[in-house]
Image (spheres, rainbow, N blue to C red):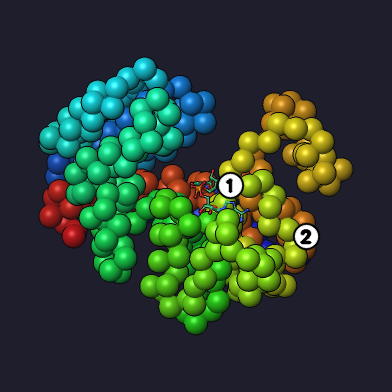
Amino acid sequence: MSARLLDGKGTAADIRSELVPRVAACTRRLGRPPTLGILLVGDDPASQVYVGTKSRAGAEIGLSVEVVSLPSTATLEAARQVVERFNASDDHDGILVQSPLPAALGPEAERALFDAIDPLKDVDGFHPANVGRLVQARPRFAPCTPAGILELLDRSGIELAGRRAVVIGRSQIVGKPVAMLLLHRHATVTICHSRTRELPAVAREAEILVAALGRPAFVTPEYVRPGATVVDVGINRVADAATIRDLLPADSPRLAAFAKRGALLIGDVHPAVADTAGAFTPVPGGVGPMTVAMLMVNTVRAAEIRLGVDG
Ligand code: NAD
């Protein structure tokens, strides 16, 4: 491995400790800690893990996190009422609806609930008013994963202005907003997706390559220009032993973890890319912790907006 590792875990810890005095100042002025309300519907195991991680990260820096859990049989109306209660509450600064929602709520449920959140409390940045502000380069709350990627690149000294960036994936939560943030930082940005032709050749143009497609180890060295910075957004749970053996070298310490747990988290980028890239984000320990840190940043920002300190 010759590439430089971009340490999301360490950078996220720095960001969280920088927030502590801001949290303390808000707590003094509000008479309570900045508070995040999370709505979790259903029993998706990954969502439960993510909500647990967010709650612990919040508690660690003095935020209050209230999780309302509804069963997978809950109606969209019941979920909307929780959002409305958080909206009306003077004791909640930020609101997050954990996705994915159970399929039984219907294909429009996610959009309906994101739209129902008060834009001033929308710490995930998915409300159309906040998406519009992001596009206009005056973000109130930038979505946490894209904001975390930019923060990690900045703090790692990766230059963006004038450079070629390619984003693989065009989702609302990662691909599109990260492309917008890179554009605002004067990168020349190409967005690729499942119908892009000659994807490896397009990706090889990138000096900064962001992989956010949700396909384990999809981005192999043939997609990567030598020396490029590669940002791996993917979080894919892989339980197949043969696939894991194919992906990881025989002396990888991760194999012991696989033997113990029966599954590993694998990014969208093949581990062999570490020999071609100039810098890359690991999975785990790259974009994931940055996402949680930026949720904390946005929650503190929501409290500061309420106090008139900001925005
Ligand atoms: P999504 O399924 O909503 O979107 C995937 C995108 O990839 C789509 O735009 C699709 O066109 C594109 N795509 C799919 N297959 C492709 C292919 N073969 N070639 C080119 N493009 C292709 O996914 P998402 O919500 O954006 O998430 C992407 C990945 O990032 C997932 O693994 C997800 O778990 C992970 N994720 C990680 C974090 C984090 O904090 N690290 C946060 C959000 C999502």
Q: Secondary structure at mark 1?
A: loop
Which residue in the structure is indicated by mark 1?
214
Q: Is residue 176 above or below residue 17?
A: below
Q: Which residue is mark 2?
A: 1
Residue beneath the point at 38% across and 73% down: 184
Q: Quadrant of residue 176?
A: bottom left
Q: Is mark 1 within 8 Å of ligand 1?
A: yes
Q: CA distance from mark 1 to mark 2?
A: 24 Å
**Amino acid type, label 1:** Gly
Residue 238 visible in the snapshot: yes
Residue count near mark 1 (Cα–Cα under 10 Å), binned few <14, some 14–19, many ≥20: some
The quarter holding residue 76 reads top left
Q: Nearer the viewer, mark 1 or mark 2?
A: 1
Q: Secondary structure at mark 2?
A: loop
Q: For the point 32% across and 19% down, which residue is it?
A: 74
Taking the spot 32% from the left edge, 42% from the top edge, the residue there is 111
Answer few, some or many: residues within 10 Å of disc 2's Cα (few below 14, many 20 plus, some between 14 and 19): few
**Which of marks 2 and 1 precedes in the sequence?**
2
In depth, the one of 295 and 182 nearer the eye is 182
Whether residue 158 is visible: no
Tag 1 and tag 2, C-beta contact below 8 Å: no
Residue 192, how many percent across, how many down? 55, 63
Three-letter residue code for mark 2? Met
> Quick one: quadrant of the C terminus?
bottom left
The quarter of the picture where residue 168 lies is: bottom right
